[in-house]
Image (cartoon, rainbow, N blue to C red):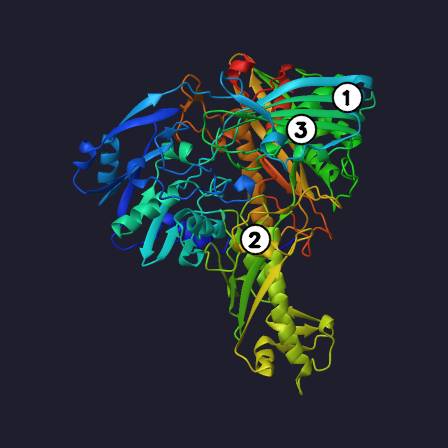
Amino acid sequence: MGRPEPRVDGRLKVTGNARYASDFPVANPAHACLVTSAIAKGRIVSFDLDDARAVPGVLDILTHETVGNEVHEPKFFGSGGTASTIHRPLSSAQISHAGQIVAIVVADTYEAAREAAYRVRVTYEEEDAATTLDSDGVETLPATKVRKEHKNPRVGDAAAALRAAPVTIDAVYETPTQHHNAIELYATTCVWSGEQLTVYEPSQFVHALKHAMAEQLGIDAEDVRVISPYVGGAFGSKAAVTPRTALVAIAARRLNRPVKLVATRAQGFTIATYRAETRHRVRLGAQRDGKLTAYVHEGWEATSRLDDYLVGGTETTAHIYDVPNVSTRVNVVRTDRATPGFMRSPPEVPYVFALETALDELAEALDMDPIELRRINDTRNDPITGAPYTSRSLMACYDEASRAFGWRRRNLPPGSMRDGDWLVGWGCATAVYPTFMGAATARVRLARNGATRVEIAAHDLGTGAYTAIAQTAAERLGLPVAAVEVLLGDSALPAAPVAGGSNTTASCCNVVAKACDGIRRRLVRAAMRADRGPLRGRKPSSVNFVDRHIAGEDGAKVSLADAFDMLGAPMIEEYAHWLPHGMEPDALKKLHLGSAALTGGAMEDRIAAAFGAELVELRVNVYTGELRVPRIVGAFAAGRIVNPRTAHSQYVGGMIWGIASALHEQTELDRRVARYVNTDLAEYLIPVNADVPDVQAILVSEEDRLVNPLGIKGLGELANVGTAAALGNALYHATGRRIRKLPLRIEDVL
Ligand code: MOS
């Protein structure tokens, strides 16, 4: 494990000096406000803009009548593009979801823009909208029909194995719509300087946003620059390019003046993506000793009419236990809603909830400890392909978590632990996240005095990327972290992957280390070839960079400054690119074009994933049904941990969000009109300190020599996987009542 360095950007953030997208000062900006659709399906008959235009300071009102074909059709990210939807904003009178952008008002002040937006009157012709999975009018299709590349993992003969199994489970699970609700709102500022466009927008993928703007506006990509050094939360919502950006760019071009948009929180629920609701039927077959013989998982995922979004299905769950017969199938349900998208651990959160709850039901049926059931079905190989895990520490995680939790004292029968008016339940579940990596490039410059600058168009979503990257360069070059300056979040920097799939640390630290190694080679060669000097004639492999020196094993050393003098240069700059295992060489070219392709997880020749074990105590009030979570323990293994402090923070945050997700979090739909009801932060219930008094994250050490040169697995999205199942399982243990639908609510308990 690396050193628990404090965040290098911490001071900037707590003093308000970290610039988020809407903080950048631009000269004489005009302000934009969106008008969004009041219906979910139908068409706009007419606009009445007179009142809106009468507001002093209004400069322009863009509608489909004035924008029309100005935005070219975006390429959907699910089909190799970059956009959250193929919808062309303000291109027609057609409405395909509630809250769709129908106009954008631009004015001298935000207040004037907002007032005018309120005064825009739209007459609609409304049609019946299909809201969710079992609404009238939805269209259900196999995922393989919707997207040809989709694979439903399967092996053996699951149907026969189910029939033959002495113990079986067959149950249906459901998970709701959820929204990311990052604190930083969806903001975009566009500034034109002649042909050149600068976009300030919080982004998980600046190179994709750059290329998307070029495509959608029909301009040269080299004329677009995207700046996003800090992102105030994203969770997947700022990865794909949303329709608003092109509209702001068009408004700015028309006015020949910078235009700044900060969408309202309510608008954020409909102008960006969200977590799709899902349903699952899971069937398990097992022998009496707990050995799984069959796993059958059919999923249904809601999506829009326009786009072929897939949550991801059983890509993860099919590969994690030793089951000889697996059969999975995913269906897509088209509704009259905006297109869903990535939200923290997109397939894992819902699909693992279903599997890990079913496993708890199986443990109950077998009268077996649920951790023991997972031990019996642990594996070193992918059950589908037989390929080995690069490393896997699931049971080590369970061992450490159960020791810390005191799991041995668990009384087995449900309802057997009580403390006064509270029924007490203990539950567990597995957390898992596939290890993804992407092609990456970076530039590192080292000066004679040790000052180092790392340039990489990666993204820090609040996760600690600045710090992990600085640490990697500092360690490689034998410098203090303070000597390293890291520049991120700017499309003018060398391209790095989308900050998605928790790949940033693995991809970026590996490429930065590679660039540092290039610098080392040049300095070492100079020191070894120098006529004089203590390292003359040594082998390159026999020296290391420590404490601003190149040091031999015997203590002989040359200072960095002397090595630079031997080289005869004041500084070295190295550019490096890195391709992870299994990635085609053309991935670098595609990366520069904004491709979000990642590699990893279950591959033909190997499988890589980070694991964890989450154990929770849940209390249920016998009179009111109130649910409390006095403690949660998670133990996680994710290869080499670059920074245990930021990793710990990710784990704690992930588990707390997992608790929120399981107990509170649901975007409520008015099913009659396919509109969201609770589109604000006030009703987005998140646990505060009193709700989560004891959250313990244990970092289990794990060495992985295969996954990538530095042995790093991503962990950002790991810890909220499994939390919901652990809580539901604890609720069952407390009460004897199995709730198979999230969130777990008092009304279901009563
Ligand atoms: Mo994360 S949902 O892969 O941005």
* Label 3 with label 1: CB-CB less than 8 Å: no
Residue type, numbered disc 3: Cys
Residue type, numbered disc 1: Ala
As measured in the structure, the alpha-carbon distance from the residue carrying label 3 to the one carrying label 2 is 41 Å
In this view of the protein, which residue sits in the foreground, 192 or 448?
192
Choose top left, top right, bottom left or bottom right for residue 56: top left
Q: Residues within 10 Å of mark 1 (few under 14, many from 20)?
A: some
> Which badge, 3 or 1, comes first in the chain's sequence?
1
Q: Residues within 10 Å of mark 2 (few under 14, many from 20)?
A: some
- Which residue carries the number 1 mark? 159
Q: Is residue 166 visible?
A: no
Whether residue 296 is situated above or below residue 688 in the rendered picture = above
* Residue 91: x %, y % from top left: 36, 37
* Residue 436: x %, y % from top left: 63, 46
Question: Element type at marker 2?
Answer: helix
In this view of the protein, which residue sits in the foreground, 506 or 597?
597
Question: Element type at marker 1?
Answer: helix
In this view of the protein, which residue sits in the foreground, 169 or 544?
169
Q: How many marks?
A: 3
Residue at image x 53%, y 57%? 495
Residue type, numbered disc 2: Lys
* Residue 353: x %, y % from top left: 62, 27
Which numbered tag is attached to residue 428? 3
- Which residue carries the number 2 mark? 590
Q: Is residue 118 left or right of residue 68?
A: left
**Quarter of the figure that contains the C terminus:** top right
Whether residue 102 is situated above or below residue 504 in the rendered picture = above
